[in-house]
Amino acid sequence: MESASNIPETPNAPATGTDASDDGPLLAVHGLTKLFPVGGSPFRKPSSFIHAVDDVSFQLGHGESLGLVGESGCGKTTVGKLLVKLLEPTDGKILFRFAGDPVDTETGAPWDPAAMRGRQLRSFRRRVQMIFQDPYESMNPRRTIYDIISEPLSVQGMGDVQYRVDRVLEILTLVGLTPAGAFLFRHPHELSGGQRQRVAIARALVIRPSFVVADEPTSMLDVSSRTGVMSLMQDLASELGVAYLYVTHDLAVARYMCHRIAVMYLGKVVELAETEELLRNPLHPYTKALLSAVPLPDPGSRREPPDIRGDLATPIDPPTRCRFYERCPAATAHCLNHPHPLLEEKSPGHLVACYEV
């Protein structure tokens, strides 16, 4: 099995994340589920649902980066939107404990986005931000770079006009857009793709959040810009103590950016482990197939195609059995006749959802 050897290592890969608070992890997700109705009408309840995210659980430490990988449509972006409360979960719990303020000051309990309204929600938004995949579509083309980056400061009521100008200049310099003053009154269409993505990162970090969902922030950039943006995000994580949920389909990017990787398939997390452990010792058949599909750097090399059959099954009302059953080369009658396997620890820190592992 040629797994991690095909994915280039990086000398500045992140160190293992640690908790900055004795009160537990920054983020704990329990049984997170999101169903989208199919069909129906104002007079008839829908009878079918898309299971975009189905019983997903994981934890994320303070200052840690977790990569969420899988093919398109597996539910990665939906998880990210649920965590920042752009979508409401159908079921499950999302609990935050921010360093220095581990509990909601109004309720005395861990921060629960689903229960937040008004002032509580605005306070939560100050701690949690999202970087979107398309840096152009996520910005108002009529607004200047200063307006775009300073808007979170204005919404949160942070400082006067001079403070906001100084803070925007500071964050522009921090993300590598220099001289910062030359960018203040430009518009998004005047910048390159890499520059726009740096503006998107600056907007997310200008209020110094504790947690950022990065939804494939480098997928639309050329190779040179991609490397610079990834290095920038690592440097900012180290400097500002930011924890990332890094959504990507690129295992090379996940290896560069993340302490741990969670592999998703049809709304389920099927494997979760520390990055190097998962890449060198994949256990789930789907993870093995993903790794075998990574291109080899030698154009003269040849290898067998991934040991996987069929196409991605429909996420509409999937059967209760293992989601990967139809495509799995190791599937048995036991897999067919039992519910989707639980995510269980097969070795220290290495969790897999498979009956045959």
Image: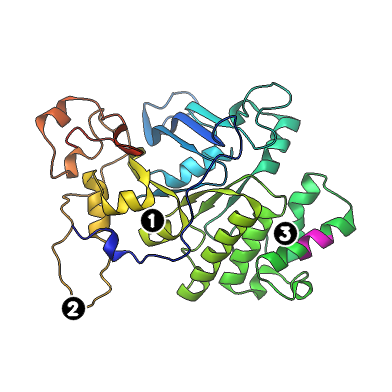
Give residue 248's position: percent from left, percent from top: 43, 54
Question: Residue at (63%, 44%) from the top-left corner?
Answer: 210
Question: Residue at (70%, 43%) from the top-left corner?
Answer: 126
How far apart in space, not on screen, are marks 2 and 3 (Cα)? 48 Å
- How busy is the neighbourhood of tag 3: few (under 14 within 10 Å), some, or many (20 plus)? many
Amino acid bearing label 2 = Gly
The residue that label 3 is drawn on is: 148
Mark nearer the N terminus (2 vs 3): 3
The residue that label 2 is drawn on is: 300
- Residue 250: say if magenta: no
Q: Is residue 25 left or right of residue 345?
A: right
Quarter of the figure that contains the N terminus:
bottom left
Question: Residue at (22%, 53%) from the top-left corner?
Answer: 289
Q: Quadrant of residue 128?
A: top right
Asked whether residue 143 is in view, the answer is no
Task: Look at the numbered disc 2 and give the secondary structure of its residue.
Answer: loop
Mark nearer the N terminus (1 vs 2): 1
Look at the magenta stretch and give its main secondary structure: helix
The residue that label 1 is drawn on is: 249
- How busy is the neighbourhood of tag 2: few (under 14 within 10 Å), some, or many (20 plus)? few
Location of residue 348 with respect to 137 vertically, above or below: above
Amino acid bearing label 1 = His
Q: Quadrant of residue 284?
A: top left
> Mark 2 against mark 3, which lies toward the viewer?
2
Residue span colored magenta: 165-169
> Mark 1 against mark 2, which lies toward the viewer?
2
Location of residue 249 with respect to 107 vertically, above or below: below
Give residue 82's position: percent from left, percent from top: 52, 38
Amino acid bearing label 3 = Ile
How far apart in space, not on screen, are marks 3 and 1 (Cα)? 28 Å
